[in-house]
Image (cartoon, rainbow, N blue to C red):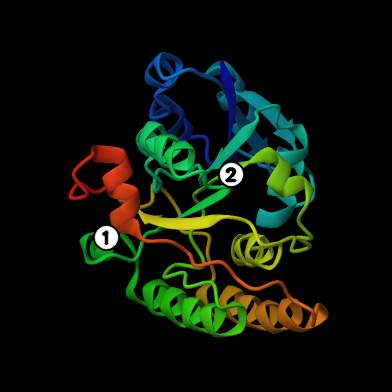
Amino acid sequence: MSSLSVVMPAYNEAPNLPSVIAAVPLSELAEAGWETEVVVVDNASTDGTGDVARSLGARVVSQPERGYGNAYHAGFAAARGDVIATGDADRTYPFDALPGLLKVLEALDVEFLTTDRLGPGNRDAMQSTHSMGNHALSLVSRMLFRNGLHDSQSGMWVFRRYVWQSLDVRSTGMAFSQEIKNAATVAGCRCLEVPIAYRVRGGEVKLHALHDGTANLCQLFVHRFRRRSMSAALPAGDPAQASEALTGRGTAAL
């Protein structure tokens, strides 16, 4: 049986955790041959996030240093699975899509699978300022890293654990999301991007569009020029090909 770690960073997400953890389809994953653990990284929460996660059967990792990247560094270090899947604990990401995403990962022999939330069907789930910022950052990322990604900021990825062990990812904050994708490109990993459904956030929005967007933009240039000798980037892949592998028809979305 293959092993999967579902890693979720969480800062004051206690109200959202019951529905988020319930959305991980453990029975369906087991039927498909995946032994699954849910790892919640309690990022210095003050609302009992860790206790709620434990009560729901998750393994809790404490990361007292706040920051999106800090949480993932701790979570990935603790993950036991051969494959790692990620997503925020705020009800926005479709954890119920994991069986299909894993099928794509295996069928197409992908090493790093990332997701695109910016399709027209998800327009109402994201604030317009955040959507514009995502499009702008993704454009700069494509220009600097030639990765072909439509959504450089998506927080849902599925990848083989050995990939993480080979990457140089330094961000401690929100820029972690773009950096891990760009680092996978630089490392020459077999990468693919597929569309997903995206949902309205539960609770308080914690992203600060101007501050985080500016920091992410600066990080793109720092990352690009800290290593001048770069591997040729692999194409980000064709979502239609991924859908075909998933459905056999090439018409259904994940």
Q: Quadrant of the N terminus?
A: top right
**Visible in this render: residue 254?**
no
Between 187 and 143, which is closer to the camera in this rendering? Answer: 187
Residue 143 vertical placement versus 20 (above, below):
below
The image shows residue 75 at horizontal and vertical percentages of 70, 39
Query: Residue sitting at 39 percent across and 77 percent down?
Result: 129
Query: Residue sitting at 50 percent across and 67 percent down?
Result: 235
SS assignment at label 1: helix
Residue 43 found in image quarter: top right
Q: Amino acid at mark 2?
A: Phe
Left or right: 28, with 236 as reference point: left
Residue 180 found in image quarter: bottom right
Q: CA distance from mark 2 to mark 1?
A: 24 Å
SS assignment at label 2: strand
List the residue tagged with mark 2.
Answer: 159
Dot 2: within a 10 Å radius of its alpha carbon, few (fewer than 14), some, or many (20 or more) residues?
many
The image shows residue 63 at horizontal and vertical percentages of 76, 42
List the residue tagged with mark 1.
Answer: 122
The image shows residue 36 at horizontal and vertical percentages of 55, 22
Query: Residue sitting at 51 percent across and 65 percent down?
Result: 153
Q: Amino acid at mark 1?
A: Asn
Left or right: 191, with 71 as reference point: left
> Mark 1 and mark 2 in contact (Cβ < 8 Å)?
no
**Visible in this render: residue 242?**
yes
